Amino acid sequence: MKSQPPKVSVIFPVRNEGKNVKMTLDSLFSVKTNIEIEAIIVDDASTDNCCKFLSLYRFKEKVTYIRTEGVGPANARNLGASRASFPYLAFCDAHMTFENFWLDRLVFYLASGASDAICPAIGSIDDPGVIGYGQSLTPSLKIRWHQKKKRLFETAILPGACIVTSKKAFQDIEGFENGFSSWGHEDVELSLKLWLFGYRCHCEPNVKVLHLFRVSHPYKVNYEGIYYNLMRMAYLHFDDNRVKKARTLIHYAAPSKIEKNVINDGVLIKRAHYFKKRKRDIEEVFNKFNIYF
């Protein structure tokens, strides 16, 4: 009996994306694929009517629309995942275009057991020759893109622009960090958690999607929120010495205030829970990818 092709829920967190949402969905539904796809749009407090077109959209029967009021990109993704009908999840930005069979080729590695979470090569819409291939971290925990490799390879960090995994793995790691109420570090935290909980993250350099790299956000992003997420991630996953080192990375806010807020928000209980559940420690993961932090 011939097996049925995989089914994938593609989740888009959206906030003030203008015409990008329609561009992205048009691309998603126009490229060739053998996979059944549903799109889930999580409109997180947009004020620009960027999703208004959905009421008359030609593929609206394949789109689930959810409106939220400022829960942040991590929780928007979690909400989208909770409404997903299919066993595989793709988390994508709402300013992208896709190529034929991109999702088929990525999900193949998940379905075959070769990977647990995967990203494609990510090029620039404005200059498609500029391409990144998965990510790692610098000694100051900044993102560093990999250069191209010939075939599937392990990557420390899956870029938030496009992450594909199974619903089973996503639920086991308890999703994106629900304590992140603003933008910053959500893809890094998820990737580290996948590795810590015993999963594998890969990049397939021979599959490429295009992404709009913006010089500014279409909504307000503040330093305190970014640093809060950094310290929360550190408390959730780092050893004590690395938690102290993470504190030294806070430059435009009061470290003691941010750390106090993180602790008051119950991070130590979750830290203990994660430390019991994980299969690797952060030393092993950082050593594996030569992250000198």
Image (spheres, rainbow, N blue to C red):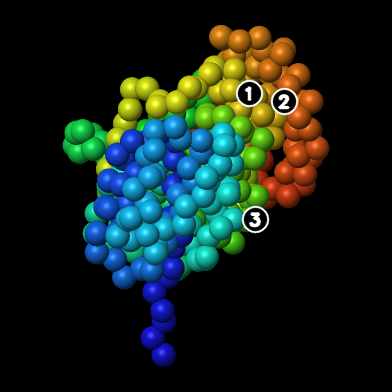
Query: Sequence order check: which comes first, mark 3 or mark 2?
Result: 3
Residue pointed to by mark 2: 262
For this rendering, which residue is in front, 201 or 180? 180
Please give left or right for residue 91 compared with residue 98 in the image: right
Position of residue 6 relative to residue 214, above or below, is below
Query: Sequence order check: which comes first, mark 1 or mark 3?
Result: 3
Q: Which mark is residue 167?
A: none
The answer to whether the residues at label 1 and label 3 have Cβ atoms under 8 Å apart is no
In front: label 3 or label 2: 2
Residue pointed to by mark 3: 172
Amino acid type, residue under disc 2 in the picture: Val
Residue pointed to by mark 1: 228
Amino acid type, residue under disc 1 in the picture: Tyr
- The image quadrant of residue 272 is top right
Q: Residue at x 29, y 60 (%)?
A: 58
x then y, percent, for residue 88 = 49, 62
Position of residue 268 relative to residue 60, above or below, is above
Position of residue 162 relative to residue 214, above or below, is below
Q: Secondary structure at mark 3?
A: helix
For this rendering, which residue is in front, 273 or 47? 47
- The image quadrant of residue 229 is top right
The answer to whether the residues at label 2 and label 1 have Cβ atoms under 8 Å apart is yes
Residue 135 visible to the viewer:
no
